[in-house]
Amino acid sequence: MKKITILQTSDIHGSIFPINYVNNEQANIGLGKLATIIKQERQLNEQLILIDNGDLIQGTPLTYYYIQFLKDEKNPMISILNDLSYDAAVIGNHEFNYGLDILNQAVEESQFPWLSANILDTNTGKPYFGCPYIIKEIESVKIAILGVTTHYIPNWENEHNITGLDFKDCLQETKKWVTYISEKEHPDVLIVSYHGGFERDLETGEPTENLTGENQGYAICKEISEIDVLLTGHQHRSLTGNLNGVETVQPSNNGQMISKVTLTLNNQNEIINKSSELLVVDNVEADVEVLKKASRFEEETQHWLDQPIGKVEGDMLIKDPFLIRTSDNPLIEFINKVQMETAGVEISNTSLFSNSSPGFEPDVTMRDIISNYKYPNTLKVLRLSGQDIKDALEQSARYFVLNREGMLEVNPNYIQPKPQHYNYDMWEGIEYILDIRNPVGNRVTTLNYKGAPLNLQHEYDVVMNNYRAGGGGDYLMFKGKDIVKDIPIDMSEILANYILERKTIKATVNRNWKVIW
């Protein structure tokens, strides 16, 4: 009997230290804790396979600070993975957030290959990152590991961050490469590491989202029989299971846990058993060597986060994120007004990205900015028809449902399988009412611009973040619209500069919108 152990991290999003940067409280997250588990597992099986499944280099104030001020130094995330002897990593969608120069630098610094068979160089037609797959041999067992990435990235990412890349359909490219590997390499074990998730319920097969192609894990398991293990991510779900004979795992996000797949083979190298589990980092001490590796980056980041920027006159704190989304409020109004002033337009939309967003303290620091605007979004101005705006509001209204008692609740589709609170937008520059008692698609009961009904045939310039401008969040009415202006500066930087210049900002509410039920 032979045993093959596969460890998978995914969607670490720049998390190294076991803390919450909003308040620096201890948290069960981070590469530091994961490293302890990895080293413990190596003691049990020195020849284990260790793979990161993408969304590694972006996501915390530390990684943001590194990109802004220390990018000429070696990337701390890569240095840690090198020290932990990772076998491979897969490109995730957030790897592109800081542009190809930063990503290429990270790949060059890596002592392991980055895999993505379906991201091609438009000039050569070959995989841009070189290796589509790798071969490992453990105890005379030949193991192939193929890496693929959700091809939906052009719908979210700034064009200049992905220039020269062609994102091929993940399902079709996986089929092609699995066939190639099977015929050329004849592996005993075939692993696919996929930065993507599942589009259907694993038990019933019912769709759990619009079938856009963003997630294709269910189809991959059902349609490609040669795969033994499918490592997944992107959705930040915690799951293990077996679908159509394929062992599947997904280890949440931010380093809360690590996936462990164990394969048992007989002496003829035939798989006779598969099992999987998620090893959580709770009650695990962070590895001192890993924390030391990033300590200087962390110290500088913490100092930067506590730098005073300005003051708030009034209240911009968030006490109830649910209520924030039911009527106009000072924080969202402020962000929208900054976007409008920066872009020179009269209509804007934005969202409250997370239920953990705390709002702005009376004395604003960079910590407040990063805690509330957590993504490295830039701004785009789209030219939209009045009908596009109405359709977008109807899309936002899907966020709410009424329960049996007639009380307002969040639509479960925005909570499971992945929280998507960031896909509910709030607007400034128009006046509107959403009536959730009405059927989906007919909930916009008032829609005015400058006191008169919005002309559905007229065109308006609207500023929004680049993710939404690409149609992200099923805002398909925005896809392909004329881009009037592109503002390639991180919104967090725009907000910080805005407050620095004015020293004091006022919390105002003009009550231009509300939700009724």
Image (cartoon, helix red, strand yellow):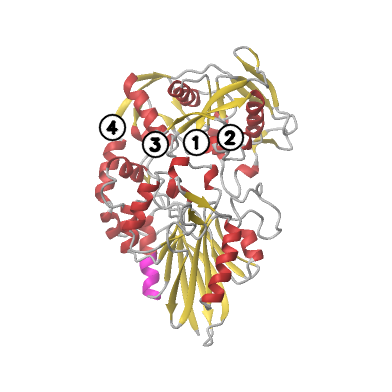
Q: Residue 466: give its label.
A: 1
Q: Amino acid at mark 3?
A: Ile
Q: Residue 307: give its label.
A: 4
Q: Secondary structure at mark 2?
A: loop
Q: Secondary structure at mark 1?
A: helix
Instruction: Answer left or right for 84 relative to 228.
Output: left
- Measure the C-alpha gap from mark 3 to mark 1: 17 Å
- Foreground residue among 75 and 408: 75
Residue 17 position within the rendered picture, expressed as x and y whole percent measured from the top left: 34, 51
**Which residue lies most toward the bottom here?**
267
**Which residue lies most toward the top here?**
451
Q: Amino acid at mark 1?
A: Asn
Residue drawn 59% across and 37% down? 479
Q: Amino acid at mark 4?
A: Gln
- Above or below: residue 427 compared with residue 67: above
| Disc 2 packing (10 Å; few <14; some 14–19; many ≥20) | many
Majority secondary structure of magenta residues: helix
- Measure the C-alpha gap from mark 3 to mark 2: 20 Å
Is residue 462 at least partly visible in the picture? yes
The answer to the question of whether label 4 and label 1 lie on touching residues, with beta carbons closer than 8 A, is no
The answer to the question of whether label 3 and label 2 lie on touching residues, with beta carbons closer than 8 A, is no
- Measure the C-alpha gap from mark 2 to mark 4: 31 Å
